[in-house]
Amino acid sequence: MITYNTNHCLTQSQSFTADFPQYRKKQQGVTLIELMIVLAITAILAAAGIPWFLNYLNKTKASECLVLLSGLKTPIEMHVAVKESCPKVEGLGGKTTGKYTNGISRHEDSVDGPPPVCIYTCTFNETEAALEGYVFALKRVGEGIWSCGSEYTTLPINLRPASCVD
């Protein structure tokens, strides 16, 4: 037992924390196993998230073709209304190349005459390995009606813009 003197100090060599366990300093920090569990959870999330993120990036790059082709819809519609034929891309005056695309061209299966069926394709350049060799097409199927999920599009469905998935 510990006795106290009049100054309320301990008189024995016994430690204060031995008699009063509530004053013991609790161990702080994390153990190695806790760190390993956090690291494993982070690795699993990264392994699942990186492919999803890369697919999202490629889908965004692929949508550049839709943007370029959509910018040409109005001049094409104006030309069709006047001449009832599908115009060449060079005479439309819009932007036909982008960062990820080689350019836009009129497909040889386009049919002039009332009503004209205009098909325009966009190809991707070699800088994007995930998109290289694919073709994105926009087909005019009627007055002001366009389809981008046509048989001329070789872009995989998971990389097509949401509005172009049939």
Image (cartoon, helix red, strand yellow):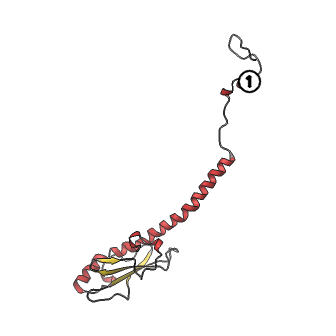
Q: Position of residue 10 (x, y in %)?
A: 72, 17
Q: Is residue 42 left or right of residue 12?
A: left
Give x and y (percent) for residue 25: 67, 31
Q: How many marks?
A: 1
Determine whether, in the image, residue 149 is placed left or right of residue 129. Answer: left
Q: Position of residue 29 (x, y in %)?
A: 65, 41
Closer-to-camera residue (158/106)? 158
Which residue occupies the foreground of this view, 103 or 157? 157
Which residue is rendered at x = 64% and y = 51% of the image?
37
Visible in this render: residue 89?
A: yes
Q: Tell me if residue 104 can be seen.
A: no
Q: Residues within 10 Å of mark 1 (few under 14, many from 20)?
A: few
Give the position of the N terminus as an image quadrant. top right
Left or right of 12, for residue 140 = left
Farthest left residue in view:
82
**Horizontal and vertical percent position of residue 23:** 66, 27
Q: Residue furthest top?
A: 6
Which residue sits at x=34%, y=82%?
89
Residue farthest toward the right in the current orientation of the protein: 13
Q: Which residue carries the number 1 mark?
A: 15
| The furthest residue to the front | 166
> What's the residue at 24%, 86% (across, down)?
83
Q: What residue do we see at 54% from left, 61% from top?
A: 49
Secondary structure state at the residue bearing disc 1: loop
Q: Quadrant of residue 101?
A: bottom left
User: Which image quarter holds the C terminus?
Assistant: bottom left
Q: Amino acid at mark 1?
A: Ser
